[in-house]
Amino acid sequence: MGRPERPLDGSTGPIAAFAHDLRVLRNRAGNPSYRELARTALFAPSVLSSAASGHRLPTLAVTLAFVSACGGDRAAWERRWRSVAGQTGGGAEVREERASVPQQAEAPPDGVHALASGVIRLARPAQLPMGSRTFVGREGDLADAAEMIGASGPVKVPLLVSGPIGVGKTAFALRLAEEVAADFPDGQLYADLGGSGTGGRSANGIVRGFLRALGVPAHLVPDDPMQRIGLYRSLLAERRLFVLLAGVRDEGQVRPLLGQAPHSQVVVTSRARLLGLEDTNRVELDTFSRKESLALIGRIAGPARVRAEHDATDMIAELCGDLPLAINIVGRKIAARPEWAIAYTAGQLADRERLMDSLCVGDVNVRDRFIAAYEQLSPTEREAIHHFGQTGAGWTTSIGVAAAMGIMIETADELLESVVDAGLLQRANVAGRYAVSRLVSAFASERQREPGPFAAAVPMAGHRARKNAFESLRHEAVRTLPGGSSEG
């Protein structure tokens, strides 16, 4: 608890009244010491004490930090400050104060308080990559996401965009950022957490980059990881930023990058649902509708060509499983070869053994995305993937996988859920049943044929018997599950 303050000098002017009310606010917060307030406000104790002395109007930054540390209403106090500044010529007074107060009074040796006090001008970052000019569809999901972001509340709730590989999660987030840009005038931060090895990028490294992007000089970035994250969260709370964290692999990777931010929005994209994150709004993307697939091909290759060969274009969408990434690749290949009939491209895609080769344009291809996820799987999870390639079916069940792999059904359920979180499988509308896309099935078959580290974990001995057992159980599942069908 703080010690009693010196009485105000008896003045009844607006600055004295302002200081008096700051003292009342501090008292209602439990009368913490200025040293305690400094830990939250990121100002030197002497600066906070001076704010409530009544000698001069504190800066707006100091006022808002004082108010936030005491749990006050920032918006109301900002209006109050501007009113007092207008009555007293506070703008000139603030400039005079900054000129007259020695810099060390507001900047302790570590420099963090100098940053918070406004001695250092923060930058307005614009780190988001370029969004797609051919973006189509997702109107309902975008409207839902924008509504979640715009909802009123004491803090902005993080938004998680999840879905399988190639469904367009980052493209969706970038389009969302464009639509809500006016609400976040202080800039955008971006990090891809999926790169740099099997574990992805660490939060500490990303935070260092974010602080530098926000204008924090290198010598003021704390060496201690927790202090670094704390400073980042403080800046996030003070500003109106849009932060996109793409390719997140697990909760632990992203949790340090979340904080109590009343005005900044964090959007996370991940193949996994990250159920360990609490207080999170969620949008789960599916593959395109057929209408969206045709619209994307038309946007890229021209609507006239799609109209002229509608049936062939529809077949391409079917062969691509309406996966946005695959549709985009094929659309670009069609656009690059105007002399070729769309039906010719459809014929290439119909060859299952060459499908992965066909879904490649420049440095963008489906195979690499699948391999990146495949490499993260355990040997047992890879074995399950290989069974998808054996059957070529459009779906699988935990019953069939359990029989084929000689494991308990409960274990098969857990295994398949892990494959879902890897983005290589989708849940169906029936418990224990999963949709296997034609693309994943072709990839699995390819992995099983390939020697080396990606070869099938299934030994060749007994392979035929296990495949027969799988087929038997699969057809049994069709008979017993509601809506069962042997068609893909």
Image: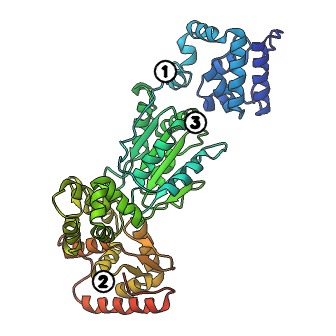
Task: Using the image, tell me which numbered label, if any, was put on residue 391.
Answer: 2
SS label for mark 2:
helix
Q: Which residue is mark 1?
A: 120
The residue shown at (60%, 7%) is 96
Image x and y of residue 90, in percent: 66, 11
What kind of residue is marked 1? Ile
Q: Is residue 116 left or right of residue 134?
A: right
Image x and y of residue 309, in percent: 27, 66
What is the tally of numbered marks visible in this picture?
3
SS label for mark 3:
helix
- Asked if 449 appears above or below 234 in the picture, the reply is below
Image x and y of residue 1, in percent: 75, 30
What kind of residue is marked 2? Thr
- Picture quadrant where residue 53 is located: top right
SS label for mark 1:
loop
Image x and y of residue 324, in percent: 36, 60
